[in-house]
Amino acid sequence: VTSEGWGGKMTTAQLSVDQSPDRTDERQRIEQLGGVVGMVLGDGMDDARVISVEEAAQLNVDLGPARVFFKENEWKPPHDKCFPGLAMSRSLGDSILDELGVVPVSEVSVRDIKPKDRFLVLASDGIWQVLSNEEVAALVTASNGNPSAACEALFNEAKERWEDQDSGPYRDDISVFVIDLQR
């Protein structure tokens, strides 16, 4: 949520926290249900293996985010080895990992809308991994109250940032909704 503060300055308030296996509480919940939180080491499926977050830190290489896996030798056909390796601990539609705690039950926070609140941005991690709250607020503000233009600006900027990361053609999903709270 972005609000107008003292002297017309815009301020942001983050209303959620990422629900990822990197979080200690989420990792513990998943591991208690029999899941493994780790990272994939290796380039192809033949040499790929899951290593712990601690092992990855000791290697001092970027293996991407922590992911949720089945325990070794508990993969379910037709999946093999390092599947699915989901980089989130809560999800809609990824029911293969329900039994390991990757469930569609999110954490919820409640905040009353205030008269100076200007807009609300709901976006996937493909936005938040490459743009700060303040950058998102600036792009939406520059769209002069046009939520469609704001969504397009956010998408384009996130896409460009992903392309600048030398990650090849990969980019995370980029989904965004902008709600004008003044209408």
Image (spheres, rainbow, N blue to C red):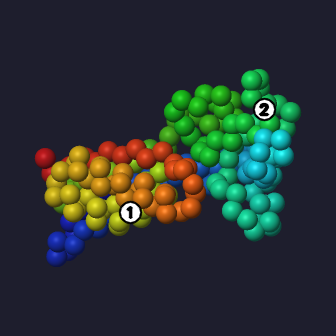
Q: Is residue 106 left or right of residue 41?
A: left
Could you tell which of marks 2 and 1 lies nearer the N-terminus? 2
Q: Position of residue 27 (x, y in %)?
A: 68, 49
- Residue at the spot 16% in from the left edge and 58% down from the top edge: 144
Q: Is residue 35 left or right of residue 154?
A: right
Q: Quadrant of the N terminus?
A: bottom left
> Which residue, given by chain and number where applicable, does mark 1 sit on?
133
Residue 80 marker = 2
Mark 2 residue type: Asp
- Hey, which quadrant is residue 103 in on the image? top right
- Neighbor class of circle 2 (other Cα within 10 Å; few <14, some 14-19, many 20+) is few
Q: Is residue 26 left or right of residue 144?
A: right
- Residue at the spot 48% in from the left edge and 45% down from the top edge: 173
Q: Position of residue 13 (x, y in %)?
A: 35, 61
Seen from the viewer's position, the closer of residues 31 and 157 is: 157
Q: Residue furthest bottom?
A: 7
Q: Position of residue 105 (x, y in %)?
A: 52, 36
Tag 2 near tag 1, CB within 8 Å:
no
Do we see residue 118 in this rendering?
yes
Seen from the viewer's position, the closer of residues 156 and 103 is: 156
Query: Relative to 39, does residue 99 appear above or below in the rendering?
Result: above
Query: Relative to 61, does residue 86 appear above or below in the rendering?
Result: above
Q: Is residue 118 left or right of residue 157?
A: left
Q: Residue furthest top?
A: 77
Q: Secondary structure at mark 1?
A: helix
Seen from the viewer's position, the closer of residues 4 and 155 is: 155
Q: Position of residue 15 (x, y in %)?
A: 40, 54
- Residue at the spot 54% in from the left edge and 37% down from the top edge: 91
- Residue at the spot 28% in from the left edge and 65% down from the top edge: 138
